[in-house]
Image (tube, rainbow, N blue to C red):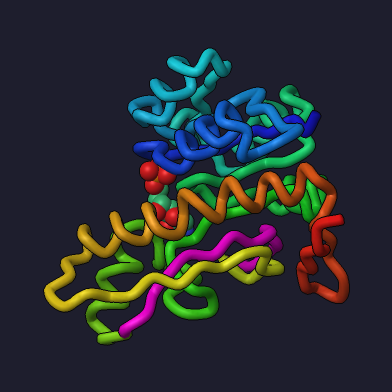
Amino acid sequence: MLRVLVLVSGGGTNLQAVLDSIAEGRIRDAEVTGVISNNPNAYALERAKAAGVPGKCISPKSFDTREEFNEKFLEAVDEYRPDLIVLAGFLVVIPPAMISRYRNRIINIHPSLIPSFCGTGYYGLKVHEAALERGVKVVGATVHFVDEGTDTGPIILQKAVEVQPGDTPKALQKRVMEQAEWRILPEAIDLIAQGRVRVTDGRAVVAEED
Ligand code: GAR
């Protein structure tokens, strides 16, 4: 059984998609053993509670220095002994020590087709604002492993979504979540739990089903 730790900052709809997918058998051989939020008011913590998953808050604001936070954050993560760490709308930079300790065991959902609209400053609604501003006709979401860069790690899954005339950033965000994020994040976790994802030469390869 793959022990999954989910890190969140906000509403937690991706966390919910993961919890529902486990309950409904779309993610096999995995359980969410903990949820950590940097934001004490994150609705995601309510979702964890409702699902009977232990939740915890650890915020950089509670520490004098970033180094101190990073150390305590890593300790908090280690306590769950995770096989896989899922960043589901987590908006804090992952400490380098955590990236190297959990190499190719941390995944992130990003609301664009990487390498478009990603990197520093592109998160949440800002991604969809930028896509509409540029006038692209196709957007989407990406699940990737986390490396030392911002949104630069090996890509596991992507799914495209069409922009509709009259889309607002919020409308586009909702469609990308419904049609892409809530599908490919659970799918990626299932693939990892089935041992079908490996990283070679900096690229993720998904093996065919037996
Ligand atoms: C999601 O759209 C996720 O892709 C995005 O934040 C939202 C969180 O929503 N993540 C990023 O922008 C990371 N760069 P949720 O809390 O309802 O899952």
Left or right of 190 in this view: 45: left
Q: Which of these two is toward me, 106 or 148? A: 106
Left or right of 12 in this view: 169: left
Residue farthest along the front direction in this orientation: 210
The tally of labels here is: 0
Residue 186 drawn in magenta: no
Q: Is residue 63 visible?
A: no
The answer to whether 38 is drawn above or below residue 132 in the figure is above
The answer to whether 143 is drawn above or below residue 166 in the figure is above
Percent position of residue 116, x then y: 46, 79
Percent position of residue 32, x then y: 63, 28
Percent position of residue 145, x then y: 69, 59
- The magenta stretch is 137-150
Percent position of residue 154, x then y: 71, 68
Q: Which of these two is toward me, 115 or 23? A: 23
Which residue sits at x=66%, y=68%? 155
**The C terminus, quarter of image:** bottom right
Which residue sits at x=57%, y=26%? 23
Q: Residue 24: name its quadrant.
A: top right
**The N terminus, quarter of image:** top right
